[in-house]
Image (spheres, coloured by chain):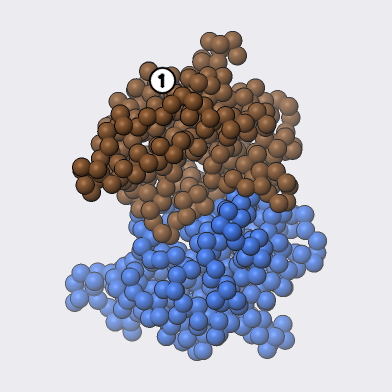
Chain colours: A brown, B blue
Amino acid sequence: MIIDCHGHYTTAPKALEEWRNRQISGLKDRSLAPRAAELVISDDALRESVEANQLAKMVERGCDLTIFSPRASFMAHHIGDFETSATWSAICNELCHRVSCLFPDHFIGAAMLPQSPGVDPKTCVPELERCVREYGFVAINLNPDPSGGHWREPPLTDRHWYPIYEKMVEYDIPAMIHVSTSCNACFHTTGAHYINADTTAFMQLIQGDLFKDFPTLRFVIPHGGGAAPYHWGRYRGLAQELKKPLLKDHLLGNVFFDTCVYHQPGIDLLTRVIPIDNVLFASEMIGAVRGIDPETGFHFDDTRRYIEAAALSAADRKKIYEGNARRVYPRLDAALKAKGR
Amino acid sequence: MIIDCHGHYTTAPKALEEWRNRQISGLKDRSLAPRAAELVISDDALRESVEANQLAKMVERGCDLTIFSPRASFMAHHIGDFETSATWSAICNELCHRVSCLFPDHFIGAAMLPQSPGVDPKTCVPELERCVREYGFVAINLNPDPSGGHWREPPLTDRHWYPIYEKMVEYDIPAMIHVSTSCNACFHTTGAHYINADTTAFMQLIQGDLFKDFPTLRFVIPHGGGAAPYHWGRYRGLAQELKKPLLKDHLLGNVFFDTCVYHQPGIDLLTRVIPIDNVLFASEMIGAVRGIDPETGFHFDDTRRYIEAAALSAADRKKIYEGNARRVYPRLDAALKAKGR
């Protein structure tokens, strides 16, 4: 079985974006603000948006199940206030839930949170609870920079974030550390801000001792861990200078990397440097890089090909495809087992 | 011959830091501000600070010459105003010049610039000119984020930076893109801010068309290019989506990567992915990561060992060690040739 732990609903019907644009207009002129109920998307429209896109590619590439969350770049937590984010995340999470009900064998949800810059993260707990309890979501996406490229919240190791971690531990769900769109002209969203955030989060975790307070807390760092595996020697050395334990003891019981690295040498490095138990299959399909690689003739984000071609044993490949995801996302494992999978 | 294109004067005598601390105190209380002339460091003190450190390690590791610039994390362009930075960079550049006069076979200078947040970069031109003309410096370090982790200047492709590029072209000198200390708690200086800046700069260059305006402008992206080589597929794909030429045509005539990657798998990836003509030997010794790697028994930053162990031909290794640096830093090449080297 192949589980893709990183998929976003990037292909939602146009009505969603139109509603969001009206919501944004409503921030300046309240008379333009739409009610949530004004967004109507039929099951057929949802089905179509996924069948021709994510699902078609999953079948083509042999991927069985995707952990499916709202479009990351559209979270845009910097827009408006908590109420804005609360309404918007409720809508986006519900759509992912509906997709998972329409295609229960192929999609299972992960929640975006109603984060807002400068707002206490505990305000995100009700939406998190709703998504886990009512929708059966198995994870959350946590944005370490709701400002969208200005980085004004404290590091992830700060007590600021603890209300979310407490709930994650209670529900035994991991968080993927995932920023949203950049509104800082220095940072291209998917080419700089995403990768920088991954690198930044990893270094914050090195500096702190978060997993002493939360021994069972688990984070997935997407996009192959940003720059961390490529600079693994630097990070081992910095941890040593900071008098931290070896990275494998300090972080690798709690921190995992996905395989959203879009060329063979990158995947080869990832699987050479990072213990296989910490690598989870993912493609972020359909996401940041949608084209066909002229060097291979296949899509850049067809990451299964790189895993197949990497020097891995069958047992290690199975861990990357399935075993590690079942361990890191226990609610996913339980949901699969309940269906005899 | 082995040229290390990335070394900072991280071991300057304590008097330098004490002077800087007084300068910073003087920003609040002008009566505490020191005159530049109050900083007195003897040749013996300079000699000692280098002989026991950088030079000893260069001899030990077989490195002949280091392109030597002021300590990057101490540039701290966010402190004070232009005058603060102007005085400070003049002092730091002069010290590097004096080191290069004391050890002319082993060090040649690269300038820090008197950048200051929100100040027109053309104010940096006089110091740049002085360093090239009077000191014989062969390069500059350009800080894309003088705010120190808040990223408030425009991208490197913006006309904002053109006065510096015009001088670089006139003098035929490259710039290493190098940030300074982070004053944003989210970003560890050497573990996040440095690497993020490398990645960010590279993506800015993909987005723009800077080298159409400056076909001979050259940038060295340090720390192995940040995350760029590891995510080379992502960057090739993003360039394609942005309708840019292939990266090799779009950037690789002008953009180079150093080898400050502190483990074998990272160097193996770098030399596998990036054309050898674009890779320049460097160690950033004595810099960010000073310890001994318990996995190898050698210093993390002893990058020559990784280059020696990489699957490279003798001709390629020679390019990385010497040939590429002579090409990218023509004033270095001229200085060496003038000495028959």
- Quadrant housing the N terminus of chain B: bottom right
Q: Quadrant of residue B172?
A: bottom right
Q: How many numbered marks appear?
A: 1
Category of crowding for the residue at label 1, using alpha-carbon neighbours closer than 10 angstroms: few (below 14), some (14–19), many (at least 20): many
What residue lies at 74% left-to-right and 38% top-to-bottom?
A: A309
Q: In the rendered structure, the residue with mark 1 lies on which chain? A: A
SS of the residue under disc 1? loop
Would residue B33 appear left or right of B69 to someone viewing this image? left
Percent from the top left, x then y, of residue A240? 51, 46
**Can see residue A214?**
no
Name the foreground residue: B340 vs A331: A331
What residue lies at 58% left-to-right and 68% top-to-bottom?
A: B220
**Can see residue A42?**
yes
Please state which amino acid type lies under the numbered disc 1. Answer: Tyr
Name the foreground residue: B47 vs B295: B295
Name the foreground residue: B242 vs B160: B242
What residue lies at 27% left-to-right and 78% top-to-bottom?
A: B34
What residue lies at 44% left-to-right and 44% top-to-bottom?
A: A73
Identify whether A14 is placed above or below B271. above
Would residue A300 appear left or right of A327 to someone viewing this image? right
Percent from the top left, x then y, of residue A61? 67, 32
Percent from the top left, x then y, of residue B167? 50, 83
Percent from the top left, x then y, of residue B266? 64, 51
Would residue B43 appear left or right of A34 to someone viewing this image? right
Identify whether B258 is placed above or below A155. below
Which residue in the structure is indicated by mark 1?
A135
Name the foreground residue: A52 vs B292: A52
Q: Quadrant of residue B180?
A: bottom left
- Quadrant housing the C terminus of chain B: bottom right
